[in-house]
Amino acid sequence: MAKKRSGSEPIAGRFGRQESRRAFGTRKVRRYFLLVCEGEKTEPLYFEGLKKDLLPGVLQTIRIEIEGKGDNTTSLVAKAKKVKERREESSGLPIDVLWVVFDRDAFPSARFNEAIEICKREGIYCAWSNEAFELWYLLHFQYFDSAIGRAQYLNMLTERLQNHLGPNFRYQKNDPNFYRLLQAHGNERQAIQNAQRLFNLYENRRDFADQNPCTTVHLLVQELRSLT
């Protein structure tokens, strides 16, 4: 079983509704979200799929941009701030909400913890996973709280989806269709509940690198799903 955990993580919150409207092409933009991801394909492909799946009309009033940087932890946070500045300068629009998405993987504990603390201090929202983003995928099929390595996530995803797609299926990172596979054969609501259940196991702790398994990706998913 996992150790007792804290809730000391930037929460997605409701951000507050901004009523001022800004021109974006021929439409009006109320809010501007920027997601900067560690992976160049896996996470961006997932969130692009979710973005296309939002309620009709959401993208007419809310701008959501997703960028994969191939960087990690503290380096990713620093790069995300630069991406935000560059996009604000080029678009002439202030970015209302900045998220970074990264994994624990094998990076030093101190760097992982520091990246999350920087986000907390600077008002950047952080969707982190320990050990890997695929934990979020796996929670669509089951709850578990045993510490396992990221390689095991891949094998477990293969096994769960073979139940639906046959014995020849193999999970492949960067599969552009994987979001759709999750929607067809997994349960997003269950994944959110499972992730929150893991998150709640910790109380008042900041040793995020030791919180395995745990993910806060569900907070970002909930925020995007709530957009209207």
Image (cartoon, helix red, strand yellow):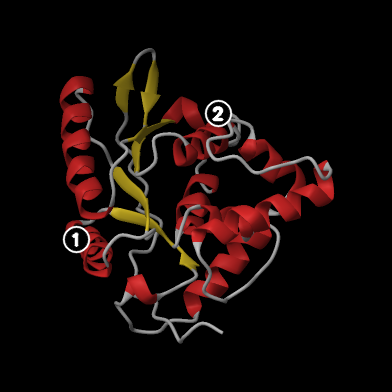
Question: For residue 216, which quarter of the picture?
Answer: bottom left
Front-lying residue, 149 or 23 = 149
Q: Which of marks 1 and 2 is nearer the N terminus?
A: 2
Q: Residue 168 carries which label?
A: none
The answer to whether residue 24 is above or below residue 122 is above
> Visible in this render: residue 188?
no
- Mark-to-mark CA distance, 1 and 2: 34 Å
Give the class, few, some or many, for how many residues have Cα within 10 Å of label 2's Cα (few <14, many ≥20): few
SS at badge 1:
helix
- How many callouts does the rendering have? 2
Q: Report x, y in % for residue 45.
A: 51, 34
Specify whether 181 is left or right of 198.
right
Q: Report x, y in % for residue 136.
A: 55, 56
Query: Disc 2 marks which residue?
Result: 57
SS at badge 2:
loop
Specify whether 100 is left or right of 196.
left
Mark 1 residue type = Ile
Front-lying residue, 165 or 143 = 165
Q: Which residue is drawn at 17% across and 28% down?
A: 86
Specify whether 16 is left or right of 148.
left
Q: Residue at x 83, y 51 (%)?
A: 163
Q: Which residue is drawn at 36% across and 52% down?
A: 102
Query: Disc 1 marks which residue?
Result: 118
Q: Report x, y in % for residue 89.
A: 15, 25
